[in-house]
Image (spheres, coloured by chain):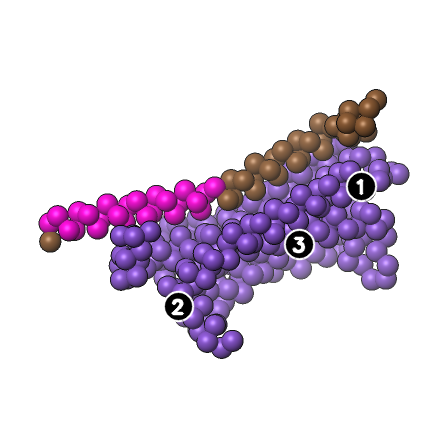
Amino acid sequence: MLRFFHQLGSPKHFYRIAGSWIPWLAAVCGLLMLYGLYQGMVVAPTDYQQGDSYRIMFIHVPSAWMSLFIYVVMAAAGAIGLIWHMKLAEVIAISSAPIGASFTFLALVTGSIWGKPMWGTWWVWDARLTSELILLFLYLGVMALYGAIDDKRTAARATAILAIVGVVNIPIIHYSVEWWNTLHQGPTVTKFGAPSIDIRMLIPLLVMAVAFKLFYLLVVLMRARVEVLERERNARWVRELVEAP
Amino acid sequence: MSGVQEFFHMGGYAVYVWSSYAIALVVLVANILVPVFQRRKLLARLARRQRRERRQP
């Protein structure tokens, strides 16, 4: 087990191991998404208040969860890279940013499309929506900062600091619906006691949440492999790989 | 309305529901394609560099 983690730290082995995981992750993630969509779009009943519009939830809520989760992973990986100079952590951190930005974008856009028929408006400057928009800007800032510095290791350090400072936004997003009066509805799944949601709606939601997590793992490994290749382009194993792919 | 029609009708919210799902599909597919093409481009670039180096050592 220890040897496994030690090997994972070496770029060459990471590239190989990640490459062998990718097809399996893709298959499981794809199947889960299809199952979740079937459960959500066909099996789950119509909501008595929101009609069928609530079905946007099955992508909106997992996207929003992922936007927060990926940010925490990115900041933690950035911190590990900063403290222990672990190159792979730097790679994971920077590979996470575009995926996190994608999910934040999805959460905002699907939320907006859901808001139009339910609230009568595409957008309000309430606490939940505004703090989520700031999260998107944080992700874009991380990507822009990394791209603006030529030396990748310096770039990774600067980016990690920005990502860590931005973590302050995460509890603000999470608790915004409790701290302020917002138009956005409160949590229905994570609150204490029994979740106030029909089990036939909860199952597809959780399946989609797991599928989105796997999707992140899949794409972050794909992106990290490219980043590792780029950084190690002068190493012998990359030269050999290029000769015989 | 038949079952299939009803499904696509989404209780009158078809525009909202299906546009959400379409955008999500585009974003997810793009996330998969970007690293695939990046990797191909990088490998091609490195291969060109190595060929150049072999010709003029």
Which residue: 80% across, 41% down? A43
Give the residue number, with chain letter if any, for mark 3: A210
Q: Please state which of residues A245 and A118 is positioned toward the viewer in this rendering.
A: A245
User: In 3D space, how far apart are the residues under numbered discs 3 and 1 (Cα atoms)?
Assistant: 18 Å
What secondary structure is found at the residue carrying circle 1?
Answer: helix
Same subunit, labels 3 and 1: the answer reads yes
User: Which chain does tag 3 point to?
Assistant: A
Q: Which chain is purple?
A: A
Which residue: 73% across, 41% down? A38
Which residue: 58% across, 49% down? A27
Q: Which mark is residue B29?
A: none
Residue A12 rendering spot, x and y as whole percentages: 37, 63
User: Which chain does tag 2 point to?
Assistant: A
Q: Earlier in the sequence, mark 2 or mark 1?
A: 2
Q: Earlier in the sequence, mark 2 or mark 3?
A: 2
Q: In this rendering, which labeled residue sits more in front, label 2 or label 1?
A: 1
Q: Earlier in the sequence, mark 3 or mark 1?
A: 1
Picture quadrant of residue B8: top right
Residue A207 rendering spot, x and y as whole percentages: 71, 51
Label 2 close to label 1 by CB (< 8 Å): no
The colour chain B appears in is brown
Give the residue number, with chain letter if any, for mark 1: A43
User: In 3D space, how far apart are the residues under numbered discs 2 and 3 (Cα atoms)?
Assistant: 28 Å
Q: Please state which of residues B52 and A17 is positioned toward the viewer in this rendering.
A: A17
Residue A70 rendering spot, x and y as whole percentages: 58, 56
User: Which chain does tag 1 point to?
Assistant: A
Give the residue number, with chain letter if any, for mark 2: A10
Amino acid under disc 3: Val
Q: Which residues are magenta?
A: B33-56
| B48 magenta-colored | yes
